[in-house]
Amino acid sequence: MSSDKLATELKSILLKRIQSDQLVVPTIPSVVQKVQEALREGDQTVAKRAAEILEQDAFLAARALRAALGSTKASSGQKQPTLSDAVTKLGPRGVKGLLIEATAQKVFVSRDGEIANALRRTWEHSVAVGTLARDVLALSGHADSDAAYLAGLLHDIGKPVVASVLLEAERQTTELYNRPWIPCAEWVEVIAKTHRAVGVALAEKWQLPEGVVKCLQENLDYDNADRTSIVNAVVFANALAKKTGVYVGTVDADDIDAIVMIGRSLIGVNDEILRTLTKGLKDRVDGMFD
């Protein structure tokens, strides 16, 4: 099956699952381990480490927001909700319930070492974009820096959703039918062709914050009307993460350089701030999900 056909079929399957509330989203093995450790250490540790744990798993973060906000959705002009807001609203018991639920989910696994590495790097990219988006707004003195982290973390949420179905198909193909699976390059290509529409559909279905939904749109560009908007922070952070090498897939170096240059001028990022943003970025996220 060609990558185009596989991408089309996957998109159709996932959009139907999202619409019918039948989407099952696995969590990351290393995050599950951290959750289990926090739960063993007691309620005080759970409450203290909740935001830290949620910040490493896009689905846990999205679940926390969904549970805390319910049907309420921040409208234009209102402060965008953050993970800290969600943790506060859920309270210790609600957070503990959420984390216990996470330990019962399936986990992301692949028998193909290259695919397993690509999936790990996909998560690292999301955390890197969240970190950079938060830092660039914090250094600009913007009050929404924590909301920018959340938007950056979730900006590619469609990728692990597509990956989860591909991993399910891989297991059936290799374990049940003993057939070879697609190579890693094709796996990455299928995700690239599919994830955006899936991510937007999931964010809208779960009524995620407006700032997050905006950052999921196709061909996202800078917002010239609001210099330090969350969208601008995420566009800049995404390009900067790619330029730093924290990314899976092909990158047009000239395009990325242009996006970084425009972002620096628009947001007001000088050489010193740029060095602060990127210093040790790869080391900070490398191995986070091993």
Image (spheres, rainbow, N blue to C red):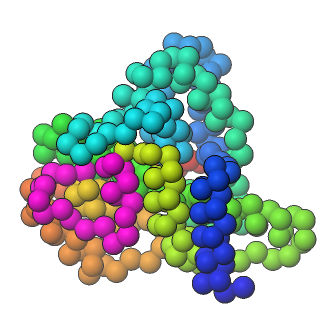
225 part of magenta stretch: yes
Query: Along the line of sight, which residue is nearer the eye, 138 or 168?
Result: 168
Q: Residue at x 39, y 60 (%)?
A: 216
Instruction: Pick out the residue farthest to the bottom.
Output: 2
* Image quarter (top left, top right, bottom left or bottom right) of the N terminus: bottom right
Q: Position of residue 162 (x, y in %)?
A: 60, 63
What secondary structure is the stretch in magenta mostly built from?
A: loop
Query: Along the line of sight, which residue is nearer the eye, 78 or 235?
Result: 78
Up/down of 31 relative to 126, above or below: above
263 relative to 23 in the view: left or right:
left
Up/down of 20 relative to 218, above or below: above
Instruction: Pick out the residue farthest to the right.
Output: 177
40 relative to 92 in the view: left or right:
right
Query: Along the line of sight, which residue is nearer the eye, 118 or 221?
Result: 221
Q: Position of residue 50 (x, y in %)?
A: 48, 27
214 part of magenta stretch: yes
Q: Over which residues does the magenta segment extend?
A: 210-230
249 relative to 41 in the view: left or right:
left
Q: Position of residue 278 (x, y in %)?
A: 27, 55
Q: Quadrant of residue 93?
A: top right
Q: Position of residue 75 (x, y in %)?
A: 28, 42
Up/down of 5 relative to 110, above or below: below
Q: Residue at x 65, y 19 (%)?
A: 40
Count the labels in the image: 0
Q: Residue at x 33, y 61 (%)?
A: 238
Q: Residue at x 49, y 42 (%)?
A: 62
**Could one spot residue 74 in this view of the protein?**
yes
